[in-house]
Image: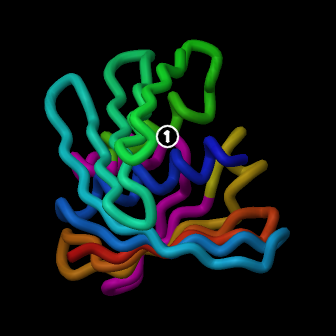
Amino acid sequence: MRALFFFLYLVVSMYAKDEFTEKRYSYALDRTTLYKGSVTMSEDSTVVRYVQPDRKVLTQSGKQLIVEDIDAHTTQTIDLSDRIDMVLYFSFMRSAYRKDMSGLKTYFEVERDKNIMTLLPKKQVKRAIEKIVMTMNGDEIQKIMINFTNRDTIEIETH
């Protein structure tokens, strides 16, 4: 489930402008955590830089994810070959960032009513995500609310 949180977070961040604020609520812990950071996407990689509460850099390239903990001076490399949740996440993220509706429709039913876009999950995504609601300003995302089936939520606002 933690990988799915990360997946959705990056997806939202990538669709968004460079900087974001993310608020995660864990139902099991009844705890909310606030994150701040930025995202950069190139042709072959995605880089997420967290500046709060911890300084971390997540770099995804191909089937590899490198997690650098700046404060702890550690680096971890994760092979995404067997991580279907993470592969789906990066695929969704790139579709969102490129505003590729056909890519989004691979994993979600997309409904749009004025400035609200609702994504209802299909296939294996349905097991973890209840729905995603995006508040839009034209084609730009202002806010994303992700509701998980376990009652956790992630709210992301762009700056």
Task: Name the residue located 67 percent from the left edge and 47 percent from the top edge.
Answer: 2
Task: Name the residue located 41 percent from the left edge and 50 percent from the top edge.
Answer: 10
Q: Quadrant of residue 84?
A: top right
53, above or below 103, in the image: below
- Residue 147 location in percent, x, y? 65, 70
91, above or below 33, in the image: above
Of the pair 153 and 94, the residue shown nearer to us: 153
Q: Quadrant of residue 94?
A: top left
Task: Name the residue located 37 percent from the left edge and 78 percent from the top edge.
Answer: 143
Of the pair 51 and 130, the residue shown nearer to us: 51
- Name the amino acid, label 1: Tyr
- Badge 1 marks a residue whose secondary structure is helix
The verdict on residue 106 being magenta is yes
Q: Is residue 117 left or right of residue 81?
A: left
Segment colored magenta: 96-120
According to the picture, the residue beneath numbered tag 1 turns out to be 89
- Residue 28 location in percent, x, y? 84, 69
The answer to whether residue 112 of the structure is visible from this angle is no
Q: Is residue 38 left or right of residue 50?
A: left
